[in-house]
Image (spheres, helix red, strand yellow):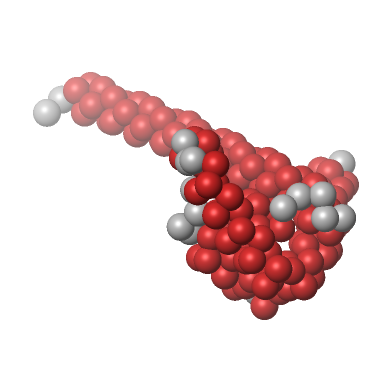
Amino acid sequence: MSLSLAAGLSALAILIIVSLAAYAWRLWREVERRKAFRAAEIARANQNCIDSLSALSQAMVERQVDMVEGALRCKVLLDIIDNRLVERDAWRVLGEVQSEAESLHTHQARRELSPRERHREDLVREEIAQRHDGRLHLAAIELQAFCLDWAQTTSASSSAHVSSRK
């Protein structure tokens, strides 16, 4: 093999290695960008859930919403954030209410019920609400504290993040 051929192949090999390294670096940056985007999306979704939880739990504390309906909605929102949250003692009642209300119709299925069937289900809902009223009220108060704590925690972490970037 001649010296010029060896030098040419070496240069080609170096060019290929540099090109692959540049491509790998570009892919790594794209993965990092996507991770950051996903983290921001999760944070935004969690914040939307916290905002909804705050409004809903406030309505429950003030008895402006049916307690069973509020419990079902709060359970769903907590599950979205982290399904382990409903394992907390104060919020277990949300899962209990959900399991008791599973057989009740909602949305379009409820609208399709006869007035008599709807009334029967309303009585069941009222009975569930009365049975769990005190615990649901306390759960709503705990949710208010949780939402406030979340807001303070995210506010502190975002200001620490902003000040560290300066």
Identify the residue at image location x=73%, y=45%. 52
Where 27 falls versus 57 (above or below)?
A: above
Specify whether 60 is left or right of 127.
right
Identify the residue at image location x=46%, y=57%. 103
Res. 88 in view: yes
Quadrant of the frame with the C terminus: top right
Measuring from the top left, give residue 92's x and y in whole percent. 62, 72
Q: Residue furthest left?
A: 1
Where 105 falls versus 90 (above or below)?
A: above
Specify whether 19 is left or right of 99.
left
Specify whether 164 is left or right of 93.
right
Nearest the camera: 5 or 22? 22
Measuring from the top left, give residue 124's x and y in whole percent. 58, 61
Identify the residue at image location x=71%, y=68%. 130
Identify the residue at image location x=79%, y=66%. 137
Measuring from the top left, give residue 139's x and y in whole percent. 74, 67
Nearest the camera: 59 or 113? 113
Q: Residue furthest bottom?
A: 89
Res. 35 in view: no
Measuring from the top left, give residue 82's x and y in whole percent. 59, 59
Nearest the camera: 106 or 16? 106
Nearest the camera: 54 or 39? 54
- Give the mark count: 0
Q: Residue furthest front?
A: 116
Quadrant of the frame with the N terminus: top left
